[in-house]
Image: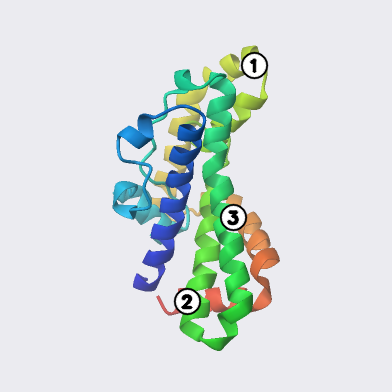
Amino acid sequence: MAMRIPAIFLALTVHEYAHARAASAMGDPTARLQGRMTLNPLSHIDPMGFLCLLLAGFGWAKPVPINPYFFPNPRRGMMWSSAAGPVANLAAAGMCAVLFRLVGSSGELLGGLLAVGIFYNVALALFNLLPVHPLDGSHVLKGMLSPQAAIALSRYDRVLMYGLFGVILLDALFNTNLMGRLLMGPVLEIFRFLGGREALLALARMFRGS
């Protein structure tokens, strides 16, 4: 299990740094002024989200503070700054996959670490793209809808948030694997596309050995 921690730190840090960087680029200095535009993982780790990611494969980091009123277009600014996290994770997964294909077969440990890097980056990206408040997918969806439709959807934010936490709680307490059944198939398909069969075998070895 300890061998997976560096990959989790990488995925969470890349995700939150991308949010902060995108928001800053579009005019919002909030995250930068609060020290969140950094690649130091300790600035981004949420203990509960970290444990969920380590144990269940799906989790979250400490949210980056974003003030949409600094953006020229608040709705679109929130959409793009929210999308930046999952996009950065998919880019990081792609980089890990390229490195795996170059060097993965030369060392079991290095290949395993890269395979785990692919997995956690893809898993974090897809989990956060769920269109459920407060995940990134909720802000992305609202930015794509008309203002009226986005306002109507926002009325269900609290219900959807409680539903999400309920699913996570059921998974944690009763091992229902509801989130895994929803997301693991797409995660593994993207993983297989990026890393191939050898990366999948390396991932299986890393999880069996944890």
Q: How is this picture coloured? A: rainbow
- For mark 2, what is the residue? 206
Which of the pair 151/69 is nearer the observer? 69
Task: State the residue at coordinates (52%, 71%).
Answer: 114
Q: Does dot 1 land on a helix, a strand or a loop? A: helix
Q: Residue at x 57, y 19 (%)?
A: 73
The alpha-carbon separation of the residues under discs 2 and 3 comes to 22 Å
Which amino acid type corresponds to the residue marked 2 in the rendered image? Met
Q: Quadrant of the N terminus?
A: bottom left
Q: Are marks 2 and 3 in contact (CB under 8 Å)?
A: no
Q: Given the current orientation, which residue lies at the most extreme right position?
A: 193
- Determine which of the numbered discs, if any, sits on residue 91 in the image: 3
Q: Hey, which quadrant is residue 184 in on the image?
A: bottom right
Of the image marks 2 and 3, the number of the one nearer the N terminus: 3
- Residue 38 place in picture, x, y as percent: 36, 47
Q: Nearer the viewer, mark 2 or mark 3?
A: 3
User: According to the image, label 1 marks what residue?
Assistant: 149
> In front: mark 3 or mark 1?
3
Disc with the residue nearer the chain's start (2 vs 1) = 1
Alpha-carbon neighbours of circle 3 within 10 Å: few (<14), some, or many (≥20)? Answer: some
